[in-house]
Structure formats: structure tokens, C-alpha cells
Image (cartoon, rainbow, N blue to C red):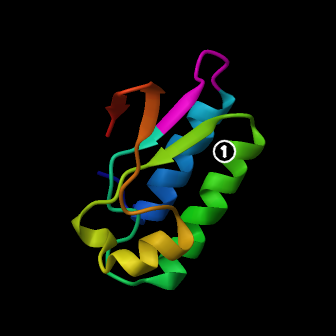
Amino acid sequence: MCSNPIPLHSATAADSAYTYWAMNPNATLTVNTGDDVDTAGDYAGYKVMLDIMDRTSAAGRLVVNIKENHDDPPVVFQKLIGPRYFYETISPGTAAT
């Protein structure tokens, strides 16, 4: 409660969080649990998020993004971030999804 507060946009908060964890020597992985953008198909919003992820990756931190409801239509998420669905084979006959 101050006389001239500075409103923080969600991108500013995300940038601050990613920067903090990128600088933390104990962090090896950043997981974004969804809603990379506030509005479906927001290419400008994805550009901001990709810039934040680039800086985090440049610091040597792996970034994993999970698609959420605001990341629809999935074609935009798939085009800019990654596959809509993915899996990794751990051993023959076993898969984690």
C-alpha cells in the first residue's frame, strides 16, 4: 500500500521468477505448469515467453512447458513451444506419458 504502486504484468512476474531460478546454483530445471499466455493464440505473448525461456536456457537451466487451457488452440503451442503430447521410452516395453 504505497502512493504510487507499480502494477506487474504476468510476464514481468514470470520473467522475475525464471531469472531468479536461472541464477540459483541449486536449480537444474524449471517447469512451467501451463498457461504460457493469457489469451489463446497470442503470438506476441508467446514471443515474450520464448524470450524469457531463451534467457533461462542460456543460463544452463532446462525449461519444460506443459500445455494448459489458455494455450489453445494447440496449433499455436505446437508451432512455437513443442508437441501437444509427448512421451519418453524408459526401457523396452515401458513408456512414460
Q: Residues within 10 Å of mark 1 (few under 14, many from 20)?
A: many
**In magenta segment, residue 42:** no
- Camera-nearest residue between 11 and 47: 47
What x and y, as percent, mark residue 5? 40, 61
Relative horizontal placement of residue 38, taking residue 57 as reference (left or right): left
In the rendering, at what x and y percent does residue 13 appear?
45, 53
Residue that appears at 58% across and 35% down: 20
Name which residue lies at 52% across and 75% down. 79
User: In this rendering, would 26 be left or right of 82?
Assistant: right
- The image quadrant of residue 31 is top left
Q: Secondary structure at mark 1?
A: helix
Residue 49 percent coordinates (x, y): 54, 64
Residue name at image x 70 percent, y 44 percent = 57
Magenta range:
24-30
Q: Residue furthest front?
A: 93
Q: Residue tagged by mark 1?
A: 56
Q: Nearer the viewer, residue 73 or 88?
A: 88
Tell me if 60 is positioned left or right of 76 in this view.
right
Q: Nearer the viewer, residue 21 or 54?
A: 54
> Percent from the top left, x then y, of residue 41?
39, 84
- Would you say residue 7 is visible in this rendering? no
The amino acid sitting under disc 1 is Thr
Q: Is residue 57 visible?
A: yes
Quadrant (top left, top right, bottom left, bottom right) of the C terminus: top left
The tally of labels here is 1
Depicted 15 relative to depicted 26: above or below: below
